[in-house]
Each structure stands twice: as C-alpha cells, then as structure tokens.
Amino acid sequence: MTFRPHNKILFLSPYPFDKAPSQRLKYEQYFPCFEKEGYQITTSSFVDEKFWKIIYNKGNFFLKGVYTLKGYFRRIKDLFSLRKYDVVYIHLWVTPLGFNLFEWLFVSFSKKIIYDIDDLIFLGHTSDANKKSKFLKGKAKAIYLMKKADHVITCTPMLDEFVRKFNFNTTDISLDIGLYPLPNEPWVYGKSGLKALQYMALGIPTVATAIGANFRVIKNEENGILVDSFNDWKDSILRLINDQKLRESIGQNGRIHVEKSFSLSSNQSKYLEILKKMNS
C-alpha cells in the first residue's frame, strides 16, 4: 500500500453513506479505490439515518427541526477535528440553512478544501415536501465555496463554465457514454427506452441493445448505436472512446431527436387530442 503525503480525507456529506444517488455517483463508489491507494477516509453526514427516513415526507416538521439541530451539533463537533485532516471534501454545503457562517469556519480551519457541486443548487431548488422551508435555504453557500475551495469538482460543461467565473481550479467529471443493456426477455418489449432517452436528452452518445422500443428511439449510427453481441458492445464503446468527434456528433443528434420526437412540446398535442376526443 502506498501512502500519500496528503492521505487523511474528511468527506462532509449532506446525507448518510450509500443513500443519496448524487453521493454514490460523485464519490462514494470510489472509496475502495482511494483506500487501496493509501488514503484514510472519514465521513460525516449532516442528515443521519433517522432523519433520512422522513426528510422527503410531508409534515413531521417538529421532528425535522430536531434532526436539523442534531445535524448542526454534528458540524460543530466536526470543527474541532478539522486540523487532523489533510483534505476536507465538501459535497453541496456544510450546513443547509442560513448564511455562510459554517462554510466560513470550515474554510478557515481546514488545510485544503475540495468542493463538489452537483446540479445548480445555488438556484435554491427544494423538494415539494419541504417548500415551506425554502426561504431558509442558503443559496449563497455554493457560490462562497466555489470561490474559496482549493479545487472544485463539477459534473457538466455548463456547470463547469459557471464555476470558472469564480475559480479556475476545476475538474469536470461528466458521464461520457450512456449504456443501456437489456436482456432478450418478454418484459423488455414493454419498456419505452426511457434510459436511452435520458442519456440522449443530455447530449450523451448512447449505446443500447437492439431490441424493442430502442429501434424507435435510436437511429443506428446516427443518433445512437444499437448492438446485438458482446463484440458489438466492445467495438462500439472503443470507437466512441477513441473518437471525440463521433461522440459529439452522435450526442448532438441524439439531443435533437429527443427534442423533436419525445419532448413536452412535441407530444403535448397528442395528449390534448385524446382529451378532446373524450369530450366530443
């Protein structure tokens, strides 16, 4: 095992380990790799397991308030241990509400800060279950952390471009190729190809099994790639990896196809026509 000069990392997460998709995708899945390289990982979540069970349910305002206070106490406790870590890795925010006090404290007392931002959280979006507390959210926290971090990790070209207004030390870690494998089983023929459509809507070149609705969603070699065998999968992925222009072309064509044939504006008339027939 190789030990690095900076080998103790504190991950400050909004949610408990292995619960939130953004955390699993952005960094939690890499923990075994980090540890194999000699990094010592400690995690601290603002939301604990009990809070996680109710946080997106409507109501429970008293309990949510109690668990939120517990989250702040955890962050106060974290403050006293910051100096023993070589790097503090912050995902989204240090605390969710109010001003930048805790963000300022953590930046001030940490040796190095990596800030990992996912989505446009500085716009202040909140879930339907917690709309009443939307005004309490600290929208400025993300901007502050972008400015003060030693490095910022983003996830889309648009977000990376925005962050670079405040900090040039960024790395965009995006999904480059979307994979949509499906088995040849009867239930597959009832699937709509949604995963492929989601990749394509983001302009991500997509490789999918040549089956069912994928033939309608993807025009092979134009806005995506359809494959039948293991060798087809391997060859198609390697082609896309080695050819940036092909990735860009297929990704752009996929985006155009979704806007033209599968978007809200392209299909709303079909739904309205059905509703009009019901009233005739």
Image (cartoon, rainbow, N blue to C red):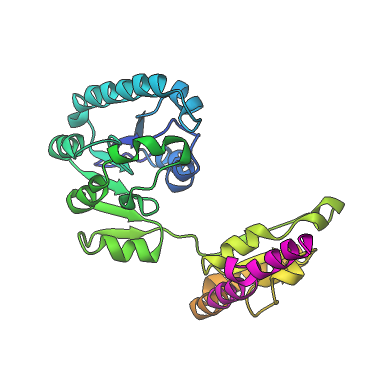
Closer to the camera in the image, 12 or 142: 142
> Quarter-wise, where is residue 63 in the image?
top left
Identity of the residue drawn at 50% across and 34% down:
19
Closer to the camera in the image, 156 or 191: 191
> Quarter-wise, where is residue 87 in the image?
top left
Q: Does the magenta stretch include residue 278?
A: yes
- Residue 231 percent across, percent down from the top left: 73, 67
State the quadrant of the C terminus: bottom right
Q: In this view, does 91 lie above or below 195?
A: above
Q: In this view, does 200 lie to the left or right of 76?
A: right
Closer to the camera in the image, 40 or 115: 115
- Residue 248 percent across, percent down from the top left: 50, 76
Q: Report the span colored magenta.
A: 251-280
Predominant secondary structure, magenta span: helix
State the quadrant of the N terminus: top left
Q: In this view, does 179 lie above or below 72?
A: below
Identity of the residue drawn at 25% across and 63% down:
164
Identity of the residue drawn at 60% across and 67% down:
263
Q: Is residue 72 left or right of residue 265?
A: left
